[in-house]
Structure formats: structure tokens, C-alpha cells
Amino acid sequence: MDHSDLPPLGFDPHQRFADDLPATGALQPGDPVGQRRFVTVTDGRPFALEGGGRIDEVVLAYESWGSLNAGASNAVLVCHALTGDSHAHGAIGPGHPEDGWWNDLIGPGKALDTDRWFVVCANVLGGCQGSTGPSSVVPGTDRRYGADFPQVTIRDLVRSQRRLADRLGIGRWLAVVGGSMGGMQVLEWGAMFPDRVDTLLPIATTAAASAQQISWSAVQRVAIVNDPQWAGGDYYDAPPGKGPWAGLALAREISQITYRTTEVFDERFGRHHTNQREEFSQWGRYDVESYLDHHGQKLVRRFDANTFLVLSKAMDLHDIGRGRGGVAAALARLQMPVLTASITSDVLYPAYQQAEIHAGVEAAGGTCEYHVIDSPQGHDGFLLESAYLGPLIARTVATAEEKR
Amino acid sequence: MDHSDLPPLGFDPHQRFADDLPATGALQPGDPVGQRRFVTVTDGRPFALEGGGRIDEVVLAYESWGSLNAGASNAVLVCHALTGDSHAHGAIGPGHPEDGWWNDLIGPGKALDTDRWFVVCANVLGGCQGSTGPSSVVPGTDRRYGADFPQVTIRDLVRSQRRLADRLGIGRWLAVVGGSMGGMQVLEWGAMFPDRVDTLLPIATTAAASAQQISWSAVQRVAIVNDPQWAGGDYYDAPPGKGPWAGLALAREISQITYRTTEVFDERFGRHHTNQREEFSQWGRYDVESYLDHHGQKLVRRFDANTFLVLSKAMDLHDIGRGRGGVAAALARLQMPVLTASITSDVLYPAYQQAEIHAGVEAAGGTCEYHVIDSPQGHDGFLLESAYLGPLIARTVATAEEKR
């Protein structure tokens, strides 16, 4: 595979300082929307991590759509998944190699109606799309963190987001919404900061990563560290075309299978061969192999291998019961309205995990709506089934607003 | 990972010529049973392959248990899966790093009762446990095939087994039995040589590899060829400790997840951490990660990476409909009794695939028993659910014998 066109990173983290958030904090009337902004949430004090480490300076990159009203009472936080970023809505453009990952759900007149609500999405701590992560330059030095970046947890991600809310002047979100790793953050928002959120929408996610989920993460990490060009995480100064791209692409190919289903693959690809004349060659490829390769190559052009390692591990560490007396006790903290949803064909975050969230909240006297989306799309259903998810999300946020 | 104890191969293919089959062919009365024997099935004529290549000399390693009766009418052929070999029954011993993979089903008084039937299992063409494969020395040279070994198909495997049957003097098997890749061979026996087999037992298998199954095979192959020590397949003369072990181990780790289920992993491992003090370390490991690593390391001590590539591709190429007017037309050829079985929790060979075999045979006027084994074991259920499979297999073979 030719990677000679590739810089070590698809995104240059230095770029982020170009349009930092004004010191005053929140967006001002007339500020452009849909533009990535950057805010330093550490204010000169180190950010202490759940696992015991610390990060001296944490910058979060975020985007927002719509206008924050005078009472700051119309804000919704969207949390992204493993390889997502702040670009939940919007077009391809500079720094945005892909369309907004939830374009179908966010925008004027959409479920998360930006004519009505102020929608925020931040790249997570540990990310590689503008927020402080392994590819960031260590302040006061000219080197990047690389493998020295401390292991963060979902709780660390959420605590940094709470600081962002403080800086934006948002005391309380109408809703925190997200699927997959985004849903993990949603649950931690409810458990850590119940006074800062009206309603939770954790979609296609889990209260604690299962052994099987850990397994999938683990083999993807092995794919990366097996790549000699990963070089112990110290590949940022490698010459153009050199980097752990083969390993990261393989990690993505593995995950891509777990995101979809045999039904979708049968329908889209079947046994069609890319070049029938090479059918009996060891190296001939079926269409589905080209599809996986395409997804792998697309990711290495926009994502950082060390961020993949750190966030994948953060997902494995996700257990809302840790230090809280177990999952049941943690779910009992969720006394705000909760809505969760499963996708029937999701093999990566199977329906039993969302049913557990539902049962746990209700068992503790809370309120949890539970929806089962009958869809062949697999885990990616949380990105694709907007016709089903949209009305649920719109109604839930509207109800929260009415109760204000 | 330290591989300094590893020879390039767990098994020395040269060893196989020590106890070749006598020129007379079949086992003789008094011959030891359960001992690996070797037979050259090419008899001086090249073996032509479905894909167009040829192999000048094909040796098959096989084992047998029980005694072939005077009429050679009590023989059962067992076909092994991807990383299996001829050691379907028996103990650990020289050349046999593991117990027989179907010990629970084969033996005196077992379902495949070796007091009554003559049970044969051969390492497949392309294998690495004694049969001709990529690790074999090219006859008349001192080099091994490596990546020059031609791509074989399931049909090639079965044609070589038919030659073995000829050499053993077995005109017609009472039954051909196997799961997974073994089941692919069972189906091809029925489609290619209907006069040579009384009944077919294809378990947890498919009429044609699906796009998802091809995907899993593909990422495992990428894991191997990404390993620089795979060296284009030319690693047999590498110094001790050098070889594509990291890549092959990763391939195994990936497949191991697909062989099991979230239920089994939850019950066996849950979120237990191998060393709780390292919980928040990027490199700390949950028990399930150690389990996967164990399976990966175990495989590299007994298996050849090039064989993995060749057989994995042979499975992708499996389509009983190829050149026969499609799967339905091919299943219509199976006019002998067929018994197939699904494992409810099998995500790699999902139940719809065995249901398709059942429906296709019956639609063409054939006879196919179909059993659904309610088990949490996943694809490995075909190895583990002997309490369920045993009586089915015993009854089917006994019925075939009664009809003789």
C-alpha cells in the first residue's frame, strides 16, 4: 500500500491555536457558527486524571450550531464515538475531511433543531482533531506526547467537557446525547454531574465494556503496535509516507466488520470479485475486501494511531460501576429521564447491554424509555437510523425544555 | 513477546517420510492404529488444481482408528477445520502437541465408535501437519514452497482425499463428517463424488462463504502479511526465534473472538484484570486479553503462517455453486441423506447458512435432517457440544450401515 502522500497526521494539531476561544469564554452574538473553536480548560492548573496522572494543559476543540439563548437554557451536548470528532454537523472543508457524522440529525429543522437549540460537540480529550491528545505538542517543548500521553478514562473526558460547559456559560444541558463511546460519556455525565443535565440519551452503548468488547479493542491495538512503524508511539517526526498506517488501517478493517452485519455485507457485496480473472489467486480480492481496505485507508488519512490506542483503552476501562459500588448502584444515580435504544442487529453493543441500562435505571425508581430499533445496519445503526432516532431525540429534548 | 524458543515451524515436515504408507496401500491387520501415516497420492502424475496450477507430488498425512472390515464397508471420513489436522483422536505425543480435536466423539464406545467403524482423518492438502503444503520441500530441491505454493480450493482438498480413499481401498464412505471448513469438504464430497459416500454430515458450515466470512479471513491474512517477518512467505530459513509469529498470533486472536460469544466471555472473564495495579495503564491487560494472547501463542507453536494464508483463502473460495449453475443446483446434487446442524450462538457460521443447506436439499427432493443446537458456545460449539452432536452422528452412521 502506497502511503507516500501521507503526512504523519491527517490533521495538524498546531493549526488549532489559530482561532482560539476569546478569553471571555462563551460565543458572542454574531460569531460564526459551525466553525471549530479551541478553549483551554485548564486555566493554569494541571488536569488530574482518574488513573493518577495529570496533564498540565488541556485544550478542547469544539463546534457549535444554533444560538445560545439569554438564559443559556437551550444547550444540547453531543458526544462522539471512537473515531469521531467535533464535526457532528457541517460540510467537508478545511480541517474537515468528512461531512458531519450526524448531519441527518443536527441542523435547522432536524431532530436536534439548530433553529431552536444550541448544539455543541467537542473533540474528546485524547483525540486528534484539535483537542489535547498524544499528537499534541507538550507545552513548553517542541516534542509531541506520543506514547507518553497518560491513559485517560471516560470520566476524564467528561470532566474536561464539564469545564468546557463552564467556559461556555452553560450551567445545565437540556440533554447529553451520544452513541457507542459517545453513550459512555452520556452515562458518566449523569453519574458524575446529575445537576448539570436534564436528560440523558445513551444510544447503542453499555454501562461497562464487556469482555468481548475488550477483546475487539485489544486485537485492534495489537494490529497497531505490531506495525514496526508505530515505533513505540514515536512516529511523528518520521519522513512523509512513514507511519503506522498499515497497522491503523488493519485496526479499522477489523472494527468495520464489527460495526456492520452479515446481512448488509451479503446484500452489498455478496461474493462479487474485484477482478474475476484473479479469482483463484491468493492475492485476488473480493469486493468486500476492497471495501474494508477503503475504510482502512480513509481512516489513516484523518486519524492518529496513538489516539486510537488511548481512546480504545478508555472504552475498555469504561465501567460506570467502578468505585461506586457496582453498575446497579451507579445506574441508581441516574434520576433524570433517560432514553436508551438498541439496534437489533448490533453485535458489538448487543441489545442486552441497553436493556441492562433500562432495567437498572427503572429498578432504582428512575425513568428510562427503551426503544429497540429493528434494523439490519448493526452498530452503525446509531449513525444511520436517523429516521427512527430523530423523532425520539427531538421529543425527548423538547420535553426537557418544556419542563424547564 | 519472546519467540526465541521457536523453530520456524512447530512441525518438521521432513519427519513425515519416516513412516510412509507401504506401497500396498491400505492398513494391514496388526498395523498400529492412531499413528500418523503418509501416502503419496500423485503416483508420478501431477495433481491438477481447480484454479489452473498443478502440484507435482502430493503427500497426505492421515490417521485412522478402528479396523477396516473385509468388505471395506465400515469406513467413516472425518474432515478437519482450518487449524485442525489428522489428529482427530488420541493423546498428546510426539508430533501431536494437542489432544485429538474430536476426542469426545471418536473412540471405542463413542459416537464414532472405533470398535465398529474405521475412522479416518487426513491433514488437508495445503496443511502443515504432514500433508503437502507451503512448508513442504519442493521435490528434487532443497527449498520449501513458501508463497510459491499454488492456491488450492476445497474441491482440490476433496479430490486429494478421494485418491487417499482409493489407496486405502475404500470405495465408499459410510459417512463424511466435519464442521466449519470440514463441513465445506463434506458438501464437496457429496457434490463431486456422490457414488463414494452414503451420507453427509456438514456441521456449522456453509454452502458458500459469505462476504462477512471473507472479511474475517481477509483481516487475518492482512495481520500475517503486515508482519515484516513474514518476508513475502520466505521465512523458513530464518534464524530461531524469527518468523511471522506476531502476525499469525494476531490472526488467531481475531479468529478466536469470532469462534466464541459474548456470553461465554462474560462468564469466563467478565472485567477481571490480570493485574489490578496496572488497571489504568495503557498496557495493563484484562484476563480476556491474556486468554487471547495464550491462544495466539499456542497456535504459532504448532502452525504455519503460509498454510493459514492458503487455507483461509480456500475457505473464501468455497462456493459449491461455482461452475454448477449456482448453490441451489449444487445442493440438488445431494441425493444421499444429509444431516446438518446449527449452533444458535454461532456468529461466524450463522444458522441461516445451515438452514439454507437444509432448505436447498429438501427443495430438490433430497433428504436433509436439520438440528438447531441451543448453546452459548458459538462456532466452537461444533467441537464442544459432543453431548448433542454425538447421538445424531452415531444414529446417522448406523442408519447408513443398516442400509448397506
Image (cartoon, coloured by chain):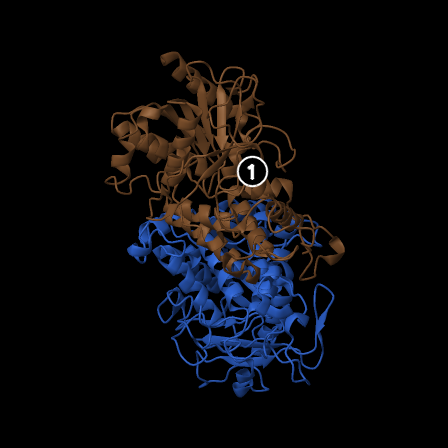
Chain colours: A brown, B blue
Q: Residue at x 43, y 30 (%)?
A: A164
Does B249 sit above or below residue A299? below
Q: Residue B268: horizontal and vertical position, in percent?
A: 32, 54
Q: Is residue B2 left or right of residue A363?
A: right
Q: Residue at x 60, y 28 (%)?
A: A90
Q: Position of residue B335 (x, y in %)?
A: 59, 54
Question: Relative to residue B207, is residue A191 depicted above or below?
Answer: above
Q: How many marks?
A: 1
Q: Looking at the image, which residue is at 37% across and 22% down?
A: A171
Residue B62, horizontal then vertical, whole percent? 52, 75
Q: Quadrant of residue A11?
A: top right
Residue nearest the observer in this picture, A26 or B371: A26
Instruction: Residue A23: give x, y in percent of width and height.
Output: 47, 28
Name which residue type carries label 1.
Answer: Arg
Report which residue position mark 1 lands on: A16
Rendering quarter of residue A196:
top left
Identify which residue is drawn at 32% across, 50% down.
B267
The secondary element bearing badge 1 is classed as: helix
Label 1 resides on the chain identified as A
Query: From this viewpoint, which residue is outermost toward the front?
Result: A140
